[in-house]
Image (cartoon, rainbow, N blue to C red):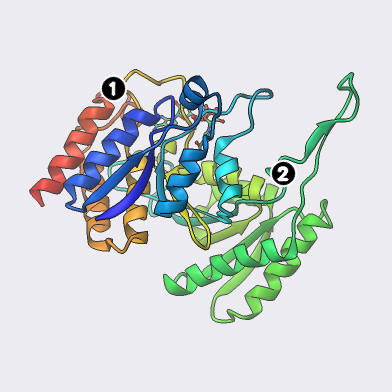
Amino acid sequence: MHNVTLIPGDGIGPSIAEATRRIIEASGVKVNWEIQEAGLGAIDKYKDPLPQQVLDSIIKNKVALKGPLTTPVGTGFRSVNVALRKEFDLYINLRPAKSMAGVKSQFKDVDLIVFRENTEEFYAGIEHYIDTRKSAAETIGVVTRSGSERIVRAAFEYAQKHRRKKVTIVHKANIMKFTGGLFLDVGKKVAEEFMHIECNDRIIDNMAMQLVMNPHQFDVIVTTNLFGDILSDLCSGLVGGLGLAPGANIGYDVAIFEAVHGSAPDIAGKNLANPCAMTLAGAMMLDHLGETEAAERIRWAVREVLKEGKKVTRDLNPEHHVGTTEMADAIEEKIQSD
Ligand code: NAD
């Protein structure tokens, strides 16, 4: 029995979290879910978007599965997602993007892994207006040698373990000579320890263009926080969109698994959300818990349902689609028929 903190989240979160929970249970893995409320719901109840009991539960269980949490844009409370990553020093944000049969997309056979630094730079919350008239604002992005080294090392170690051939370091060292320069410099030094893995680097703007022109030239990508956030959404778009993109936030002691996407307020409460991104994040969590066979069964069931294309959500087939619940039912049935 595994003890896991489950944060359903808000917007489309509760529906895809519920879908994921029952798909994991159908895989036969026994989980004791400790359900915790964070975000908008927690503000209503506890006047705090990240109550202490959520942190205590994660400290105890060390593993959490999290639905998306809304962050007010330009005002209001700071991101709970970012707060969790900082609180538990979840310095690795691992976001795979892989083509799947049956999913309409510009390219076939894309297989990318984005390693995004998850605790530093422009997400550290060091920002203010320079005067009371708000005539200008500053956000300070701190990039450290140790923070850069550990994320680049994580990317190379992943490449080594999973027999990937190339790591691309993405930066803006031509303009941000200090922060970008430091990241690239550290990255190149780490690369020297992994001479059997090809390493190159790209400036972020060129990288964005090359990814949409020819994603097959890339393999593992490692970059700083903001670029990684943007590039991982871009990579999800190469393989069918955010509805299929899972992610993991990993630290030394704690790991939190979630979809790449947000709370999608435009489709919340309508049974339209694709449950696959969070379900695939659930499979990554099972890998982390050592339940690799169940994780593989879940990935297989998702792939089969996508390949058949009959019971998929609107984002995948705008003309003939089913709801979140029905797509989750189809995945669950596949697992049970296996
Ligand atoms: P979003 O990822 O929520 O949505 C972007 C677009 O993708 C929308 O059109 C949405 O309908 C679609 N989409 C997303 N997930 C989908 C799914 N599972 N199935 C089908 N379509 C899906 O991004 P946004 O609208 O920019 O952000 C909404 C809120 O989510 C914001 O408050 C933002 O801060 C938050 N957010 C949270 C996380 C997180 O919890 N880790 C990540 C990103 C954004």
Question: Quick check: 139 above or below 165?
Answer: above
Name the amino acid, label 2.
Answer: Phe
Residue 103 falls in which quadrant of the image? top left
Question: Quick check: 42 above or below 3?
Answer: above
Q: Are marks 2 and 1 in contact (CB under 8 Å)?
A: no
Q: Is residue 9 visible?
A: yes
Which quadrant is home to the N terminus? Answer: bottom left
Residue under the image location 17 percent in, 52 percent down:
28
Residue 74 falls in which quadrant of the image? top right
- Observer-side mark, 2 or 1, equals 2
Residue under the image location 73 percent in, 61 percent down:
183
Q: Is mark 1 within 8 Å of ligand 1?
A: no
- Total residue callouts: 2
Q: Can residue 277 be seen in this view?
A: no
Label 1, residues with CA under 10 Å away: few <14, some 14-19, many ≥20 = few
**Mark positioned earlier in the residue sequence (2 or 1):** 2
Name the amino acid, label 1.
Answer: Glu
Gap between marks 2 and 1, in whole Å? 40 Å
**Residue holding disc 1:** 319
**Residue holding disc 2:** 122
Residue under the image location 89 percent in, 18 percent down:
133
Left or right for 278, reference 207: left
The local secondary structure at tag 2 comes to loop
The local secondary structure at tag 1 comes to loop
Of 155 and 138, which appears nearest the observer? 138
Percent of width and height locating residue 251: 53, 59
Residue under the image location 62 percent in, 66 percent down:
150
Percent of width and height locating residue 186: 72, 69
Of 218 and 298, which appears nearest the observer? 298
Left or right for 87, reference 145: left
Of 196 and 327, which appears nearest the observer? 327
Label 2, residues with CA under 10 Å away: few <14, some 14-19, many ≥20 = some
